[in-house]
Amino acid sequence: MDMNQYLSMFIDESNDHLQSLNENMLQLEGNPEDLGIVQVIFRSAHTLKGMAATMGFEDLASLTHKMENVLDLVRNEKLKMQDYIFDTMFKSLDALETMVQDITEGGQGKADVSAIVASLQAIENGEMTSGNASATEKNKPANASIASAVELDEFQYSVLDQSIAEGHRVFYVDVLVSEHSQLKGVRAYMVFDMLERSGEVVKAYPSVQDIEQEKFERSFSLYYITTKEAHELEEGIMSISEIESAKLIQLDQETLQQMANQVAATAEAPTVPTIVAEVASPDKNSASKEEAKTAPAKAAAPKQAAAPSRTIRVDIERLDVLMNLFSELLIDRSRLEQLASETGNNDLSDTVAHLSRVSTDLQNIVLKLRMVPVDTVFNRFPRMIRDLAKTLDKKIDLVITGAETELDRTVIDEIGDPLVHLLRNAVDHGVESIAERVAAGKPEMGTVNLRAFHSGNHVFIEIEDDGKGIYRDKLLKTAIKRGVVTEEQGAKMSDDEVNQLLFAPGFSTADIISDISGRGVGLDVVKSKITSLGGNVTIHSTPGKGTNFSVQLPLTLSIIAAMLVRLGSEKYAVPLSSIVETAIVQREQVRNIHGNKMITFRESLIPYLSLSEVFSVPDFNDADEQETEIVVIRKGDRLAAVAVEEFIGQSEIVLKSMGTYLPAIEGISGATILGDGQVALILDPNAFIK
């Protein structure tokens, strides 16, 4: 049977199950006695195991099978969920997500999960308890602990075995880097460099590439062939600064054989059900429905007729094609409306009016097809916050509201990383430690609110914590010290303007920069990403009470409302979301201040830009005009006035890329085709305000 036809279905359903597993595991952690949740988790794991095994992804199936065994003990009340079991289960889910991601990228879903499998086996056998979870590994035979750390393939085992037969020494080396080391990757490189001068490294964990990129905690392990003695190697490794410890275990052929047998035993795949050939409903609680498609549970409950699914999965590329086709229809509609207006034919005008109403309804449907609940982004945050809180030894309650709020898929795909960074900042630097909160009269558990809601043609996403807040004096002091502003400038700034200094490149108020982040580290990247989406981010903070980051985003990036303006024979479109208002100014109102043109707008001075000068429009110069139309545009809390020749009117336009033939043009975000067939460039207001 050709399984490739089911691969896309397998990936989609696996991601659904993994998300359900994460959410229900978090729920179970808050209520570990609830066997109903355990049943739901067991069914998801059972279904995922069957799907993976049928598709031939043995590592994924093997790990899920071990998880299922532990969950079976829990649901039959032979084992109680405890912290060390939750930690092992979450590590298992992380490994499963990594495997599914590898399959998504065209891989075979292979991963070294022997350490996690061994931990699950120990829990299943009753060998690991909360008191000896860490000690269990220490008390294992040397070959067991080694096999759990770094798994070798058949070829690598044979290389080590042959080396021992030829009189060489084979060592398993475990190195621990000091927790105070600022350059873990460099220290690891120095260890490898020293070892490779007198031997050969056969296998390392993590991979050498991950180690070089510092994608490891503090320790790394390797198999090593050499002629040197253990004490010589240990002395050499420990001579490298910031290395805390180095453990070496010399292996013989018997030990290698035992390790090979152990790994082979743990890698055996379970008996599996037949392939699922039906598209599942994306309902989060669909685990019970999907179980019926695989092998029956040990004690099958009476089955009821399942309701037919009312949803289907559609490839996002098909929606993109649909959007492109509709955009062409929208352009032709504008052309027909103009022709009907010019000819004055009543029958044609009535037909075009009806076409406009139908196409407007069609436009709403097409846009709604692309709308995705922000829940698709939000649902990964509870697990992330849980892990961060444990790492930082804090108590955090993440409260999510408005997860059903919808955004265009294009915006959803881009907003995840900025939100991750803002949340990590809120947990790391916003919410105080337990001791600090108690001293301040606050509850031990800090609260981070993540909320989304619609307002007009925008969606707002807010991240609010009840932590220490931002102190103006500390922020200004740091900004002045780093040359971001002068003392004179700082004294004149409002509190909101001071808070915006957090978005300066590389700015941080953290006393100690952790590997999680100090508030401000990378916030410039966050703001630039949000700005590139046509959005904006603001900060409101009350010292001692907490901080609120508010992100404003457009509903969609495909079809936008714009103001059409004329410059000579050329037409331009300005997104309405960036326009504050339009006005007319007299020539004498334009003032020259320190070489820059400025005008007075609502009792403050704002820059005045001539669009004809910016784009070198040959047949119009606003300097010759006694009065000039202006468009006041906004970028965050900054304003600017852009001079144009004439306002044409508002219109819904289709945003088209400039393509790869033209280089990036500053101030232009794309183009659109108007009803008369003319191409109008779409201005990027963010580029005009520095």
Image (cartoon, grey):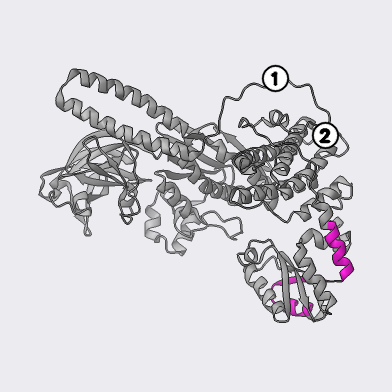
Reading the image, the residue beneath label 2 is 75
The C terminus sits in image quarter: bottom left
Give the answer, above or below, for where 33 lies relative to 396. above
Closer mark to the observer between disc 2 and disc 1? 1
Gap in Å between the C-alphas at discs 2 and 1? Answer: 26 Å
The tag on residue 305 is: 1
**Residue 263 x/y as whole percent:** 81, 57
* Horizontal side of residue 461 vs 259, given as left or right: left
**Residue 611 x/y as whole percent:** 22, 49
* Horizontal side of residue 13 vs 576, given as left or right: right
Q: Are marks 2 and 1 in contact (CB under 8 Å)?
A: no
Q: Is residue 501 magenta?
A: no
Q: Amino acid at mark 1?
A: Ala
Q: Amino acid at mark 2?
A: Arg
Residue depicted at 32% across the width and 36% down the height = 328
Range of residues picked out in magenta:
233-262
